[in-house]
Amino acid sequence: MSYSIPLIRSAVVVPFLRWMKENGRPVQDRLEAVGLGFVAPDQKELPIPLFSVFALFRMMAKLEGPDIPARVITAHSLFDLGNFGQVILGSRSPRDALTRI
């Protein structure tokens, strides 16, 4: 029997990494705690385990409060998403962005 590991691009955690760094949080310790110690902010296309991303988001909400996503998102967050962010920024409408993605 084969197993599949659901993966997602590491760009989804980059806004959180940026926020942790800017706010003096232990970025590497938190990444290692959820099995993402190999992720770097400049590797936006790196495939990472989806369940580890969920674990990071849960840990952030537990440590920083449930409003952490609202505090993390800034005007620069679309740039943090790598290629998808650039496609979204270059679109005329939300529909155009979804079609292009």
Image (cartoon, rainbow, N blue to C red):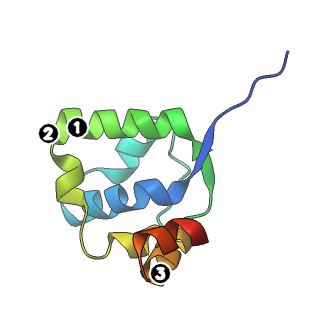
Marks 1 and 3 sit apart, C-alpha to C-alpha, by 32 Å
Q: Locate residue 83: give its quadrant.
A: bottom right
Marks 2 and 3 sit apart, C-alpha to C-alpha, by 33 Å
Tell me: residue 4, above or below residue 56: above
Element at label 1: helix
Amino acid type assigned to the residue bearing label 1 in the image: Ala
Residue 85 image offset from top left, x and y in percent: 47, 72
Viewed as shown, does residue 50 lie left or right of 32? Answer: right
Marks 2 and 1 sit apart, C-alpha to C-alpha, by 5 Å
Tell me: residue 57, above or below residue 86: above
Q: Badge 3, how many Cα within 10 Å: few under 14, some, many 20+?
A: some
**Pair 1/3: label in front:** 3
Residue 16 image offset from top left, x and y in percent: 33, 56
**Pair 2/3: label in front:** 3
Please tell me which residue is depicted at 24% across the width and 58% down the height of the picture.
72
Q: Earlier in the sequence, mark 2 or mark 3?
A: 2
Marks 2 and 1 close (CB-CB < 8 Å)? yes
Q: Is residue 17 visible?
A: yes
Q: Locate residue 77: give its quadrant.
A: bottom left
Q: Which mark is residue 91?
A: 3
Please tell me which residue is depicted at 63% across the width and 36% down the height of the picture.
6
Amino acid type assigned to the residue bearing label 2 in the image: Gly
Tell me: residue 39, above or below residue 5: below
Q: Which mark is residue 65?
A: 2
Residue 19 image offset from top left, x and y in percent: 26, 61
Q: Earlier in the sequence, mark 1 or mark 3?
A: 1
Q: Badge 2, how many Cα within 10 Å: few under 14, some, many 20+?
A: few
Residue 1 image offset from top left, x and y in percent: 85, 15
Q: Which residue is mark 1?
A: 61
Residue sitting nearer the eye, 30 or 98: 98
